[in-house]
């Protein structure tokens, strides 16, 4: 943790800081780009000057890895043990049992310098990382607790993530207890579709689950479906019937979508691009590596639409060291 972040933990003064806007990125369908979208949108918001916390609520722990953090990889057992106490799964278990645990700001990793070092005017980018065993145990702990404990993460974020403008939560596929924890924590939910029929059903199930949270928590949590992003889209010149059907279904006029049950698609799609997938192993999201390329611009477009929908100002950003890329190198 950097000195800047450590100095931000003045718990006595914390309540004077604004509470974050919490977005969950979720769908029932696996492998559609939830993690990729979470880290790219989060990084892009931080490039625009916002302070952003990425919360990895996934036993697969891929959002942390995509930002260069993998917990528990040391040869030294004591170091592993200490690091695992910073995992979100450990913190959730301790919070559920009301046991002592690290403050969220002591557990998070500050990735600002490593990920955003090339940019001027950026905000802070931090991650609460996950680890498989502790997150799976946390999921089991939620199953055994009364349903009202589903708000545990929301309470933690509203109390201990103050000062961040945005929290983005990466979620597991399927509609599980961990997903309910994420939806209950969220002010807004962004769902993801890809140009395959099955992805629409996953997004509609998620939409219904989002609406159910308000009822199930007696109105304590009221997440709203903010919109659906079409990820891994094809260029218009290569559209098939399936591409067209998916777009119609997203606006509530197609397969399995009942009238009035649209997914509020964003105008901007994110195209299929190998730059996006290969950025994972570099520990830096594509939007920070290729901000001027079409993939970077697409994430910028989605972020602007999100800011407009939640009525927050778009902020300016500049690139300290512009990256020149070949525009014709699309995958
Ligand atoms: N726009 C894109 N272009 C190319 N590859 C992409 C794009 N979006 C995601 N991918 C790739 O698709 C795969 C699945 O993405 P990702 O892991 O983000 O999905 P997920 O929904 O989080 O999966 P899971 O359900 O397992 O958590 C990854 O290999 C990722 O790099
Ligand atoms: Mg994922």
Image: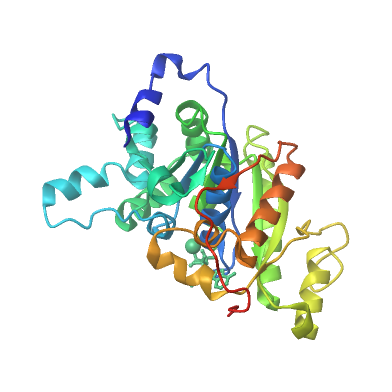
> What's the residue at 53%, 52% (across, down)?
179
**Is residue 322 left or right of 130 when viewed as pictured?**
right
**Is residue 263 left or right of 107 when viewed as pictured?**
right
Residue 101 location, quadrant:
top left
Can you say whether 246 is above or below 91 in the image?
Answer: below
> What's the residue at 49%, 60% (across, down)?
289
Residue 256 visible here = no
Residue 187 image offset from top left, x and y in percent: 64, 39
Q: Nearer the viewer, residue 87 or 109?
A: 109
How many numbered circles are shown?
A: 0
Identify the image quadrant of the C terminus. Answer: bottom right
Residue 73 image offset from top left, x and y in percent: 22, 58
> What's the image's color scheme?
rainbow
Q: Nearer the viewer, residue 172 or 226?
A: 226
Residue 134 image offset from top left, x and y in percent: 31, 51
Outermost residue to the top? 12
> What's the residue at 11%, 52% (across, down)?
76
Identify the image quadrant of the N terminus. Answer: top left
Can you say whether 286 is above or below 168 in the image?
Answer: below
> What's the residue at 23%, 54% (across, down)?
72
Can you say whether 327 is above or below 129 in the image?
Answer: below
**Is residue 37 left or right of 238 when viewed as pictured?**
left
Residue 303 visible here = yes
Residue 40 image offset from top left, x and y in percent: 55, 56
**Is residue 46 left or right of 264 when viewed as pictured?**
left
Q: Nearer the viewer, residue 254 or 319?
A: 319
């Amino acid at each position: 943790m950097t000195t800047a972040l450590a100095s931000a933990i003045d718990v006595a003064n914390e309540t004077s800081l604004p509470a974050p806007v919490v977005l969950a990125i979720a769908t029932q369908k696996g492998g559609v780009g939830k993690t990729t979208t979470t880290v790219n949108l989060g990084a892009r918001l931080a490039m625009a000057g916002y302070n952003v916390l990425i919360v990895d609520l996934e036993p697969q722990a891929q959002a942390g890895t995509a930002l260069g953090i993998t917990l528990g990889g040391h040869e030294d057992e004591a170091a592993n043990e200490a690091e695992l106490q910073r995992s979100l799964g450990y913190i959730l278990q301790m919070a559920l049992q009301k046991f002592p645990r690290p403050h969220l700001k002591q557990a998070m990793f500050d990735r600002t310098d490593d990920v955003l070092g090339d940019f001027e005017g950026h905000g802070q980018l931090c991650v609460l990382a996950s680890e498989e065993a502790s997150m799976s145990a946390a999921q089991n702990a939620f199953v055994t607790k009364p349903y009202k404990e589903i708000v545990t993460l929301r309470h933690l974020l509203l109390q201990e993530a103050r000062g961040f403008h945005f929290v983005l939560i990466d979620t597991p596929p399927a509609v599980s207890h961990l997903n309910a924890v994420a939806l209950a924590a969220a002010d807004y939910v962004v769902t993801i579709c890809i140009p395959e029929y099955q992805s629409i059903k996953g997004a509609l199930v998620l939409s219904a689950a989002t609406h159910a949270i308000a009822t199930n928590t007696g109105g304590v949590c009221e997440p709203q479906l903010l919109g659906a992003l079409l990820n891994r889209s094809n260029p218009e010149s290569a559209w098939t019937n399936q591409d067209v059907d998916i777009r119609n279904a997203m606006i509530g006029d197609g397969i399995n979508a009942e009238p009035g049950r649209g997914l509020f698609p964003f105008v901007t799609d994110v195209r299929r691009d190998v730059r996006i997938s290969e950025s994972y192993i570099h520990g830096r999201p594509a939007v920070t590596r290729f901000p001027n390329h079409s993939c970077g611009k697409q994430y910028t477009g989605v972020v602007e639409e999100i800011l407009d929908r939640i009525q927050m100002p778009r902020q300016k950003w500049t690139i300290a060291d512009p990256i020149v890329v070949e525009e014709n190198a699309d995958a």
